Structures are given as structure tokens and as C-alpha cells.
Image: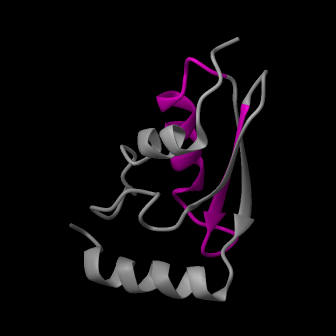
């Protein structure tokens, strides 16, 4: 069992994970929702713009790998309308970079 961490520190660690098709991290893209640091695991909510995205498994694995000193549970949810709109604006500006 690892030490408990501040969710803000966990979010900073997650900034190291770039979206596979953009030069933006998953935090700035709004893909990270709630972070809960429980005594036995970290639970992270990964927000998705739509249900079936090809990069979902790869992003989830990167989250688990970067926090490999802890047990990590990644849950998914769909972005709300405003989150999705912001995601697609950023995606349009940074796609393929």
C-alpha cells in the first residue's frame, strides 16, 4: 500500500500523459474528473467525449502505469455538453501535432 497523495499532486502527475493524437495532456483536455485517494487505492474518473473512442484503453493504461506505485481504479464517464465542446475546440487546434 502506498502513501496517500493530495489529488492536486496526482493531477500534476497526470499532466505528463499526452493524448496520443494531440500535443495536449489529458488534464488540459478536461479528460480528468474526480480523483479520490482512498487508503487502499486511487480512483480516477476519465471523462470521454463519446462512448467508443479508440484511445480509451491506451489512456487508461498510461494512467495506471504512471501511478504504478499505487493501486489505481480508472472509471469512465461521458463529458457533459460544455466539457465536450471545450474538448473539441482544443482538439481542432492541436490535432496531429
To which quarter of the image does residue 54 belong? bottom right
For the magenta stretch, what is the residue range? 42-70
As drawn, the residue found furthest toward the left would be: 97
Q: Quadrant of the C terminus?
A: bottom left
Question: From the viewer's perspective, is 89 left or right of 55?
Answer: left
Expressed as whole percent of the image width and height from the top left, the position of residue 19 reads: 40, 57
Q: Is residue 7 magenta?
A: no
Q: Quadrant of the N terminus?
A: top right
- The residue lying toward the viewer, choosing from 73 and 5, is 5
Question: From the viewer's perspective, is 13 left or right of 24?
Answer: right
Expressed as whole percent of the image width and height from the top left, the position of residue 12 reads: 43, 44
Q: Is residue 25 above or below residue 63?
A: below
Q: How is the image coloured?
A: one colour
Expressed as whole percent of the image width and height from the top left, the position of residue 8 reads: 53, 45
Q: Is residue 50 above or below residue 2?
A: below
Expressed as whole percent of the image width and height from the top left, the position of residue 22 reads: 31, 64
To which quarter of the image does residue 71 belong? top right
Amino acid at each position: 500500500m502506498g502513501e496517500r497523495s493530495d489529488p492536486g499532486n496526482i493531477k500534476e502527475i497526470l499532466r505528463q500523459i499526452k493524448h496520443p493524437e494531440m500535443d495536449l495532456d489529458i488534464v488540459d483536455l478536461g479528460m480528468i474528473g474526480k480523483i479520490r485517494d482512498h487508503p487502499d487505492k486511487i480512483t480516477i474518473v476519465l471523462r470521454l467525449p463519446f462512448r467508443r473512442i479508440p484511445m480509451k484503453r491506451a489512456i487508461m493504461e498510461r494512467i495506471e502505469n504512471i501511478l504504478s506505485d499505487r493501486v489505481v481504479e480508472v472509471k469512465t464517464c461521458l463529458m457533459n455538453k460544455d466539457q465536450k465542446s471545450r474538448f473539441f475546440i482544443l482538439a481542432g487546434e492541436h490535432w496531429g501535432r
